[in-house]
Image (cartoon, helix red, strand yellow):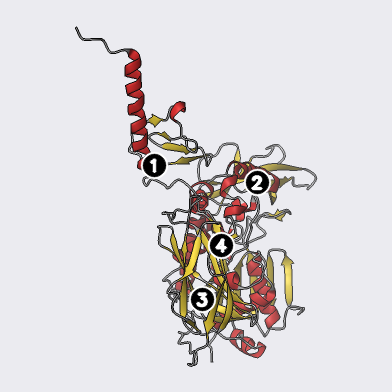
Amino acid sequence: MRKLVSMKTICKALFFALVLYTAYIMTLRYVVQPPVTFALIPSCRPKSYELVLATTNYRVENEKQQIKKTHRPKAIGITNSSNTRYYVKHSGQSVNAGSYFSVIIEARDINNSHFRKGGDFWYATIRNKVVGLNVAGKITDFDNGTYEATFFAAQSGEYDVEITLVHPSKTTDFIENVLWPMEDRVVWNGNFTSNDNKTYEIKKCKLKVHADYKNACVYSFPLALGTTELVCDKPNEKVFTCDSLTSLKSKNTYIERHFSYLFSDNSALFQKSVTYVRILNGPLKINITETSENIVYHLPECKADLPATISDGFWMKNSWTSLRCKSKQWSMAEIRQCVKGKQLYFFGDSTTRQWNGGLLDLLGLQKSNMTKYPNPKKTYHSSDVVNLTFHFHPFTLGVSNSPYRIGRWEYEIMDNLDTRICNYIIMISPWAHYTQWVKERYIERLYLLRQTVLRLRKRCPNTVFVIKTPKPRNHDTGTSLLYAGDKLIYDIRSFFLDVFKDIGIHIIDVWDMNLAHPSKSKIHMPMRIIYQELYLFLSHVCKVE
């Protein structure tokens, strides 16, 4: 008679089978085939991991994060700045002045294993402090944890090499998948004022997609915003109408609190060890050797739709040399000759207002009594030297009240320009106030702006259109990384380049120019940099002799 197998024996067998299956699963390195659901029981739990595999989620205890699965399994871990290394490509060869050279970056994790996922956000520069020469490197992401930074070796000498991890890929994923789609990242207090100006009421205002909103005041600008509308809670109907909205003030305290919670919950993604941290595992200096040949730049004229280049240019002290096209340093007499008889319109934010003031400086007109400042959102100068008007866009962010509709959408001006003249130079650059918008709504705004440009071009074919890109501003601490960080701004630059390509628009890309300069990146850069941006602008819109 056969003996019955005891329940204890059966449990042991099942236990060891479970252990073997666990080992097999761990060797797959997180490749999960849904709909398997499996969890390690506490007695079998490894010291460093608690693995929970389910149809849509897994959790890694040592990182304390819940990560939503996508169609492609993601590597568990994060780029480790202490282990990440870089080296000069073809290091056995000398780097000659006038040539290009590359630095290869290998992202590594905490275990010093080569990270096999792209998406890290890098800055790369070389600097010769003796002669004041500074260059930014162009980054190529091979999407496998390897990156290449390419530099132009403009002059011989010893250079400091600075490779900076701005954000690891997990942070850029968070920015793309969580921040950009997030609603209510920009909120205003709307001030409704009675007709006798004695009574007012404050109501919350937000940007929302067009819908049939109840008990709300809705403000639509379809030629500027498309389906996006400003929606305010309706004030007391016995005293106010929706036309009573007089000013907007961004709710900075509300936004700061909102982002503080978000930052606290995701602080590991923005800690100092992985945010704006310089990589030290690599050659901190490189020697560029003299060449016996003269360096000659064969560059095209500055024109619309220029192709991308290996390097945008370099700084020699406070003078920028473009490697995209033939730019020059302009004298006041040359600038006056260029803009004579032209009508210039600058549309944008406070960085565009710097251009407005800078151009008046270069023309010797900043203190002219012909320069008028009718309100904080508009400046104009009209004289026999130049006709220049600056308009700030509406719905701005800031610490003070801004009168509602004091700014102007681009179409409101461009659609009403006199077609009998058609001697216009139009520069457009709306970016600094849009990092808190939902991405799709901002892109819709850019495409509508593109249509505004094309409408004016149809009416005035000789109009010159210029787009100025964003630049780094180096918000490197706390919640500012979430609402105005450089990765968000760099994404906006990418939107600009994509939306306005191949339609005859001059693109003034100032990103690498500002990144390369030794001044700390901030929203309003020193005027010596602004003047160099304007020289590049003038090289596009004026004839270079």
Residue drawn at 57 percent across, 86 percent down:
328
Question: Mark 3 or mark 2: which is in front?
Answer: 3
Query: Is the residue marked by circle 4 packed among few (<14), some (14-19), or many (20+) residues within 10 Å?
Result: many
Is the C-beta separation of discs 3 and 1 under 8 Å? Answer: no
Q: Of residues 270 and 323, which is closer to you in this image?
A: 270
Query: Is the residue marked by circle 2 packed among few (<14), some (14-19), or many (20+) residues within 10 Å?
Result: some
Three-letter code, disc 3:
Asp
In x, y percent, where is residue 331? 64, 88
In x, y percent, where is residue 258? 63, 43
Looking at the image, the residue that sits furthest to the top is 1
Residue 241 can be seen in this image: no
Three-letter code, disc 4:
Ile
Residue denoted by label 1: 30
Residue denoted by label 2: 255
Count of numbered tags? 4
For marks 3 and 4, the one nearer the N-term is: 4
In x, y percent, where is residue 291? 49, 89
Residue 431 vs residue 170: left or right?
A: right
For marks 2 and 4, the one nearer the N-term is: 2
Three-letter code, disc 1:
Tyr
Q: Of residues 175 and 264, which is closer to you in this image?
A: 264
Q: Secondary structure under badge 1?
A: loop
Q: Secondary structure under badge 2?
A: helix
- The label number, if any, that marks residue 302 in the structure image: none
Residue drawn at 71 percent across, 43 percent down:
202
The residues tagged by marks 2 and 4 sit, at their Cα atoms, a distance apart of: 33 Å
Question: Mark 3 or mark 4: which is in front?
Answer: 4
Image quadrant in which you'd find residue 69: top left
Residue denoted by label 4: 279
Q: Of residues 27 and 140, which is closer to you in this image?
A: 27
